[in-house]
Image (cartoon, rainbow, N blue to C red):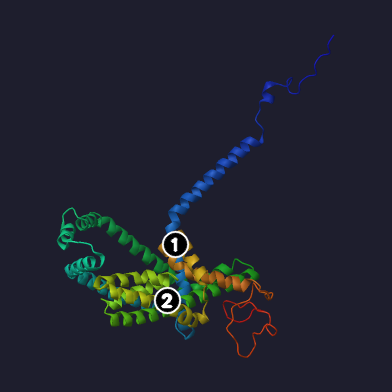
Amino acid sequence: MTAPLPPTPGLHQPLDERDRMPRWVPRAILLTAVAVLGIGVVTWLFERVSSLFVMVLVSLFLSFALEPAVNRLHDRGMKRGLATALVFLGLTVFLVVFGVVVGKLTVDQVTSMIDKAPEYLEDLQGYAKRDLHWDISVEQLQDQLTNENGPVRQFATGLASNAFSVGVNALGGLFQGFTVLMFTFYLVAEGPKARRAVCSRLSPARQQRVLTTWEIAIDKTGGYLASRAVLGVISASCASVVFSLLGVDSPVAIALLFAVVAQIIPVIGTYIGGALAVLVALTARPSLAVYVIIYILVYQQIESYLVAPRVTSRTMSLHPAIALGSVIAGAAVLGVIGTILALPAAAVVQALISTYTQTYEVIDSDMTKEERLPDPTGANHPTRRRTDRVVDSGTGDPAP
């Protein structure tokens, strides 16, 4: 006689108890749904206010750049609101004059190029036939350009059909620019009150950190932008003289564009800004374009190794790799605005790292030796060389 099988656990329990859902499952489902809904709401809100966030960020950096000038006027006894208005008035006059000059010169350049288009086509035909052995017909090129189905007519037709959208976008840009100016004005005029309101919610230790960070941001942003402005003036002046001597059309307008692009985008900005000068010179004669390219290459080296270090000695000189990487990152995140804000942001971050981190003596090793020029005094002789020390990037003095 066989023994009875042992009872299986759970088989003799009621059916509703065996199939009942664990208590934690409904709570987990509810929390997951709430989290997904919260992420969706935050994403939706961020998409709606992203433009406002960008405008506030631009205004903050502009306030950092303008506050040193306002502080100087305020220290001389002028009311802060009046000093801010005076600085804004000077900036507005400069931008208007700059826009009028560049716009007029650009229109003149375009008009001159249109008037000389037949001559350019004939020169192009002669150059192609003489040097490249290509047979190009000027009459065929003119027919293609003036044809109703040609690229010029299609471009003009498309531009006319999109005139309304272009006007709406222009008005939107003007409104955003006005909003940025208003935010900037209040951030500069009410700067001490804003900082006092922020610090009133913090402990004394955190207040000191916030004020130090704010002061570093103002100092480095204003100083860095001032140094870029000085470099831009030097670049535009030299380019205007050289382009005038070489006989490039509209040398002042091309030099201004060359200088602005070169200072906004580090390292490669000189070549991007010089592309227009090369193109204009190429339309005149190829040899002139070669001279312009030689000037751009020579000036880039002179500015990088002689002019820029002296101008930025009192601010913060960014390493070219860091500057280029920050510009690429800023362009990827915020587009053109990110490209403009990348350099001062990188300067502020580097200054904060220099302030809140400690530096140490570097171990004397073959991997840490810097290239040294021959020293007739023998100070750099291996038997008398002392240990290298890290140099503070903000002051140029040896770190403690």
- Per the image, label 2 sits on a secondary structure element best described as helix
Q: Quadrant of the C terminus?
A: bottom right
Q: Quadrant of the N terminus?
A: top right
Answer yes or no: is residue 381 visible: yes
* Identity, as a three-letter code, of the amino acid under mark 2: Gln
Residue at 50% x, 65% y: name it.
Answer: 325
Q: How crowded is mark 1: few (under 14 residues within 10 Å), some or many (20 or more)?
A: some
Residue 322 placed where, x, y %? 52, 68
Q: Nearer the viewer, residue 41 or 140?
A: 140
Q: Which of 73 and 367 is in front in this view?
A: 367
Above or below, 69 relative to 180: below
Going by the picture, which residue comes out furthest to the top? Answer: 1
Going by the picture, which residue comes out furthest to the bottom? Answer: 377
Q: Do the residues labelled 1 and 2 touch (CB within 8 Å)?
A: no
Residue at 30% x, 78% y: name it.
Answer: 252
Residue at 42% x, 76% y: name it.
Answer: 300
Residue 119 placed where, x, y %? 18, 70
Q: In this view, does 324 lie to the left or right of 206?
A: left
Above or below, 245 relative to 145: below
Residue 221 placed where, x, y %? 49, 74
Q: Which residue lies under the disc numbered 2?
A: 300
Q: Which of marks 1 and 2 is in front?
A: 2
Q: Quadrant of residue 26?
A: top right
Q: Is residue 33 left or right of residue 189?
A: right
* Identity, as a three-letter code, of the amino acid under mark 1: Ala
Above or below, 325 relative to 387: above
User: What's the mark number on residue 331?
Assistant: 1
- Per the image, label 1 sits on a secondary structure element best described as helix
Answer yes or no: is residue 80 visible: no
Q: Distance between the residues labelled 1 and 2?
A: 23 Å
Residue at 50% x, 46% y: name it.
Answer: 40
